[in-house]
């Protein structure tokens, strides 16, 4: 691997950063430490504060309060052009009056780098994004994916210790997006630079990131690896935002060691209880739930009856939306080898109480998702 | 990519379309032929045929030094007017793109109101402002300065003409500027450009098509200006249009007047042809977002 790839990234420390626009708090006490060389994704729905956080780090937006350290130095009040941070925008932001080559050379020209060296570094950056043959084209002659790769080359050509990307693949179609995700991952490995990546697409976040910070309403709900967020969501919002899930709400009975929910006359239980006074709900991942015809033998300690409301064929299996007794919807995935069910069919859902996550109820978790 | 494109109409359909689109220009085309083509042809013919066939009118024009001086002055004054218009219009048009819709409406009205006032009235108000005992000189004197001579000078003519022509600079400039993606300036800043550098390397080049468009309109209109130089100027700031007027209306020398017009027209074409390569290359580069 590239020998230059060691320790070239800058650490970032956000400490209780807030940004208010009048009475609206775009950021409400955000604290986050990003390690040198880490790929950190800021994930959340639109308006959750992830882009504001990126703009604060880039220097496009100033903070109302809190501190921000990049590479150990405070950059509060430092203008964007003095921060030496690469930024890739969703809208590419290539200069239309310059060729690809001049676009990529632009940050080097600003830094007074001599022409020979400039040429070498432009060629290297363009090769890295596989756009070496396009130096003499104008941006308007390139496709969206090509433009974004040039923008990426322009943002890394001056070797910034930190690269910020604001939904860079948001305007591209799915196939191209998936391919470029892998390209970005490769470039991150080769450069060793710290990457901060903003997206609202949780699958993209899972593919790319070392760690993910989940944003909601100007706050960070949880920071962790994709697996941590999926397996151990700290809040109902995170559980619902990452991956598919079923939320069970019902009448609560709790003793010292377990919690039982009664949903339309049927009771399910989990061998845990929630600390504190919060009203508990159960979060179930689709692969932890088995689907059966009523009366069939079933594994798992809990069963709920329902009706198939939607059957979606996925190729690798099927996904069912099952209407439960209380009117809520459960999501179940069944492998191809399993039985298939028709719309309106009565079914039973079985799961092990140990697989159900108990989380404090949060009515905003549903409404924020669209 | 071609596979993704929607079915395109056949060549025959396209041709029919094209013809119908061209037909839309017919009224304007007829009007142009009637009010520009025909008189222009007449003028060219008269310049070559009055009082008899030959080039005697052109020989007269180039034989009299005063004509050449006035021709040169016409171009100089027009160039100055263009420069003054660019300098005044650029920040104004930029402001129009930067403010909210209400303030923008006020700014647009400020540009357009002079259009609703007759050119003669506007020029006469400049006489009131610029004359030796006018507003500007009174203010200067009461502030303790010497008065300056503005009326019947080239400076006065340039000021008056620039004011009349300013909207023709502001409007094309604004229409180009409002299409410039300001996020490009932000991108330039993130790449290390301080604000002034970002302006000169990104914003200014992208706004040049508007500058060129406005400059060409202002310059060409200025070349043919009559009322403003006649009222604000003196004998040393006569422009070609005044000479044409003297020849045609006072001396009834239609041939000589026609020759002057033709010379001005050709000189303008030559100048535009010289400027075209610069403008064209810039134009191609400045793709829109």
Image: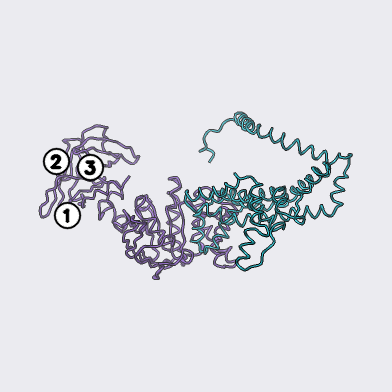
Left or right: A77 with respect to B178?
A: left
Question: Closer to the camera, A183 or B22?
Answer: B22
Question: Dividing the picture into quarters, in which one does residue A42 lie?
Answer: bottom left
B16 above or below A63?
above
Question: Closer to the camera, A22 or A275?
Answer: A22
N-terminal-most mark, 1 or 3: 1
Q: In terms of secondary structure, where does tag 2 sit?
A: strand
Q: In terms of secondary structure, where does tag 1 sit?
A: loop
Furthest-left residue in view?
A: A255
Residue B119 visible to the viewer: yes
Q: Which chain is purple?
A: A
Q: Residues within 10 Å of mark 2 (few under 14, many from 20)?
A: few
Chain where mark 1 sits: A
Q: In terms of secondary structure, where does tag 3 sit?
A: strand
Please give the label number shown on residue A274: 1
Q: Residues within 10 Å of mark 1 (few under 14, many from 20)?
A: some
Left or right: A211 with respect to B158?
A: left
Q: Residue under circle 3?
A: A290
N-terminal-most mark, 2 or 3: 2
């Amino acid at each position: 691997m590239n020998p230059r790839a060691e320790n070239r990234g800058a650490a970032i420390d956000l400490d209780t950063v807030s940004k208010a626009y009048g009475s609206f708090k775009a950021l409400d006490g955000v604290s986050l430490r990003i390690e040198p060389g880490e790929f950190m994704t800021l994930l959340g729905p639109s308006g959750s504060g992830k882009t504001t956080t990126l703009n604060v780090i880039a220097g496009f937006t100033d903070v109302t309060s809190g501190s921000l350290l990049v590479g150990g130095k405070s950059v509060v009040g430092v203008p964007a052009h003095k921060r030496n941070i690469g930024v890739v925008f969703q809208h590419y932001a290539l200069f239309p009056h310059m060729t690809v080559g001049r676009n990529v050379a632009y940050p080097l020209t600003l830094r007074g780098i001599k022409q020979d060296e400039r040429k070498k570094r432009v060629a290297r950056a363009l090769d890295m994004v596989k756009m070496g043959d396009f130096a003499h084209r104008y941006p308007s002659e390139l496709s969206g994916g090509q433009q974004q790769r040039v923008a990426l080359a322009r943002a890394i050509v001056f070797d910034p210790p930190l690269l910020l990307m604001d939904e860079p693949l948001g305007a591209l179609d799915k196939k191209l997006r998936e391919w470029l995700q892998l390209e970005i991952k490769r470039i991150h490995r080769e450069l060793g630079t710290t990457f901060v990546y903003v997206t609202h697409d949780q699958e993209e976040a899972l593919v790319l990131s070392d760690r993910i910070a989940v944003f909601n309403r100007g706050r960070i709900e949880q920071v962790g690896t994709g697996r941590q967020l999926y397996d151990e969501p700290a809040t109902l919002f995170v559980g619902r935002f990452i991956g598919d899930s079923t939320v069970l709400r019902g009448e609560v009975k709790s003793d010292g060691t377990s919690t039982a929910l009664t949903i339309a006359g049927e009771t399910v239980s989990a061998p845990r209880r929630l600390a504190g006074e919060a009203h508990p709900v159960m979060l179930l991942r689709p692969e932890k739930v088995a689907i059966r015809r009523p009366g069939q033998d079933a594994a798992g300690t809990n069963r709920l009856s329902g009706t198939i409301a939607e059957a979606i064929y996925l190729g690798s299996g099927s996904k069912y939306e099952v209407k439960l007794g209380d009117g809520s919807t459960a999501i179940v995935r069944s492998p191809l080898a399993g039985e298939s069910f028709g719309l309106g069919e009565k079914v039973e859902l079985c799961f092990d109480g140990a697989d159900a996550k108990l989380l404090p109820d949060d009515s905003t978790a549903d409404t924020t998702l669209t | 990519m071609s596979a993704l494109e929607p079915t395109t109409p056949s060549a025959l359909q396209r041709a029919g379309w094209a013809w119908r689109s061209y037909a839309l220009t017919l009224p304007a085309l007829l009007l142009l032929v009637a009010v520009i083509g025909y008189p222009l042809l007449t003028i060219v013919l008269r310049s070559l045929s009055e009082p008899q066939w030959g080039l005697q009118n052109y020989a007269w024009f180039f034989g009299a030094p005063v004509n050449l001086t006035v021709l040169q002055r016409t171009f100089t004054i027009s160039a100055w007017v263009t420069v003054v218009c660019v300098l005044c219009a650029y920040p104004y048009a930029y402001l129009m793109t930067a403010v909210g819709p209400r303030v923008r409406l006020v700014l647009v009205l400020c540009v357009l109101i002079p259009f609703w006032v007759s050119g003669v009235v506007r020029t006469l108000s400049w006489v009131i402002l610029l004359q030796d005992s006018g507003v500007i000189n009174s203010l200067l004197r009461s502030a303790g300065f010497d008065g300056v001579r503005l009326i019947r000078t080239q400076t006065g003519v340039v000021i008056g003409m620039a004011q009349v022509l300013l909207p023709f600079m502001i409007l094309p400039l604004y229409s180009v500027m409002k299409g410039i993606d300001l996020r490009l300036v932000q991108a330039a800043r993130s790449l290390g450009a301080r604000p002034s550098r970002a302006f000169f390397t990104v914003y200014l080049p992208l706004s040049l098509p508007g500058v060129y468009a406005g400059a060409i309109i202002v310059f060409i209109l200025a070349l043919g200006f009559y009322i403003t130089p006649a009222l604000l100027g003196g004998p040393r700031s006569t422009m070609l249009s005044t000479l044409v007027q003297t020849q045609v209306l006072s001396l009834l020398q239609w041939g000589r007047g026609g020759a002057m017009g033709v010379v001005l027209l050709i000189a303008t074409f030559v100048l535009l042809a010289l400027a075209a390569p610069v403008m064209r290359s810039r134009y191609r580069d400045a793709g829109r977002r």
